[in-house]
Image (cartoon, rainbow, N blue to C red):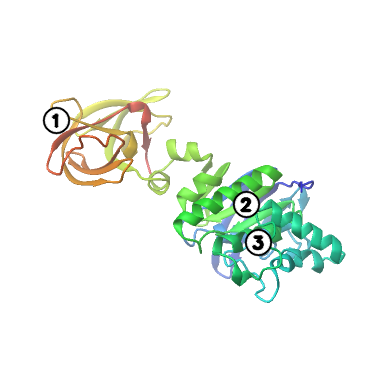
């Protein structure tokens, strides 16, 4: 099965209001054909509303929505070339797996034999060949989710929408199924918009991530850029673990700033034009622990957890409590040890809000 109708998605100044409540504020976004873009953010940020606007389950109050270059702003879900995979799977318990996958095709009056053939192809694509005669209750949660994906893709949508598709699965199964979804999306070249509140999940499956906050976009970019180059304290704290150390920007040049951190002057990467109060972003795995006699910020280990491939430390330092992840698991530091915390300035980031 190949997808011959790869679409794009574009929002131009889209506003969604429910009475006096503004659920989305003048949203501009673009999803390129064949890319998987994730809408990520805390509850109530507007990500699910955005997905429902793409699907045609909600109508925009202002602005325009384009799918595959076509203005679909005023078209309902029935007339949009999209398919959605729901959080709850929404499988019919009295139908076989094959009948569930073929359901959307039969609604579109596709001949029964053709619908059955496409359903079998869809099941093979998601690794469920030979499961067609079973009932959903005879499948595991992960298998049921794959049936829901197969049902969506046999309709050959221009855009595949996934609304918290893994939230009902346990952690180990979530990791496995998200890999399968990503592989299917890449193999078919599908355009996909994925909604989740799970940062790790978003980083694992996405070409690009749109982080939303308070009904608008806080930052968008690749998983790498969002992690390494957050544009605000919110993004730094929301995407992965981060230590946020208060500091002062005393001066800045083209791509570097001089900061004062606990009476020490440091030069760190910086692309802004702000002086004054800021936060230095220090990722836990970019920090290194050394003997207290070595250069760095001295502190005392107050917590240590051995996790097999790494050790997680909490260190009480002059700049506050720091969370440190070390891959050095032999001869670890112990609680109560004095240490020096070090980092490479190339792996730091300054944020000012």
| Among the two numbered marks 3 and 2 on one chain, the one whose residue lies closer to the N terminus | 3
Q: Residue at 66% of width from left, 60% of height from top?
A: 84
Left or right for 189, reference 267: right
Mark 2 falls on what kind of element? strand
Q: Residue at 75% of width from left, 46% of height from top?
A: 6
Mark 2 neighbour density, 10 Å: few (under 14) some (14–19) many (20 or more): many
Left or right for 251, reference 199: left
Q: Position of residue 16 (x, y in %)?
A: 61, 61
Q: CA distance from mark 1 to mark 3?
A: 56 Å
- Residue 251 visible to the viewer: yes
Mark 1 neighbour density, 10 Å: few (under 14) some (14–19) many (20 or more): some
Q: CA distance from mark 3 to mark 2?
A: 18 Å
Q: Looking at the image, which is closer to me, 258 or 205?
A: 205
Q: Looking at the image, which is closer to me, 91 or 116?
A: 116
Q: Position of residue 314 (x, y in %)?
A: 22, 45
- Image quarter of the C terminus: top left
Q: Residue at 39% of width from left, 29% of height from top?
A: 270
| Among the two numbered marks 1 and 3 on one chain, the one whose residue lies closer to the N terminus | 3
Q: CA distance from mark 1 to mark 2?
A: 49 Å
Q: Is residue 228 above or below residue 257?
A: below
| Among the two numbered marks 1 and 2 on one chain, the one whose residue lies closer to the N terminus | 2
Left or right for 334, reference 154: left
In the picture of the structure, the residue carrying the numbered disc 3 is 147
In the picture of the structure, the residue carrying the numbered disc 2 is 193
Q: Looking at the image, which is closer to me, 17 or 228?
A: 228
Mark 3 falls on what kind of element? helix
In the picture as drawn, the residue positioned furthest to the top comes out as: 254
In the picture of the structure, the residue carrying the numbered disc 1 is 292
């Amino acid at each position: 099965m190949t997808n011959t109708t790869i679409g794009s998605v574009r929002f131009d100044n889209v506003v969604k209001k429910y009475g006096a409540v503004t659920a989305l504020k003048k949203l501009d976004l673009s999803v390129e054909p064949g890319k998987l873009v994730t809408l990520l953010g805390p509850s109530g940020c507007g990500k699910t509303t955005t997905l429902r606007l793409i699907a045609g389950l909600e109508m925009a109050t202002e602005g325009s929505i384009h799918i595959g270059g076509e203005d679909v702003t005023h078209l309902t879900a029935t007339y949009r070339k999209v398919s959605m995979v729901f959080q709850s799977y929404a499988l019919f318990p009295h139908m076989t797996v094959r009948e569930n996958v073929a359901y959307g095709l039969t609604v579109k009056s596709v001949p029964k034999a053709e619908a059955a053939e496409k359903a079998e192809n869809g099941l093979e694509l998601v690794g469920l060949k030979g499961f067609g005669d079973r009932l959903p209750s005879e499948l595991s949660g992960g298998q049921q989710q794959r049936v829901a994906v197969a049902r969506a893709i046999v309709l050959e949508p221009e855009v595949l929408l996934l609304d918290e598709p893994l939230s009902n699965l346990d952690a180990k199964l979530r990791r496995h199924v998200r890999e399968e979804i990503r592989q299917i999306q890449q193999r078919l070249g599908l355009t996909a918009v994925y909604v989740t509140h799970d940062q790790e999940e978003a980083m694992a499956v996405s070409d690009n991530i749109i982080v939303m906050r308070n009904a608008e976009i806080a930052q968008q970019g690749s998983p790498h850029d969002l992690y390494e180059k957050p544009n605000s304290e919110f993004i730094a704290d929301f995407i992965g673990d981060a230590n946020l150390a208060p500091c002062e920007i005393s001066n800045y040049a083209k791509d570097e700033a001089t900061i004062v951190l606990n009476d020490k002057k440091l030069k760190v990467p910086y692309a802004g034009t702000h002086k004054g109060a800021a936060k230095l972003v220090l990722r836990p795995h970019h920090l290194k622990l050394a003997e207290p006699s070595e250069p760095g910020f001295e502190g005392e280990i107050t917590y240590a957890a051995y996790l097999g491939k790494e050790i997680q430390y909490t260190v009480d330092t002059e700049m506050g409590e720091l969370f440190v992840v070390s891959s050095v698991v032999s001869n670890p530091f112990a609680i109560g040890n004095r240490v020096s915390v070090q980092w490479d300035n190339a792996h730091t980031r300054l944020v000012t809000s």
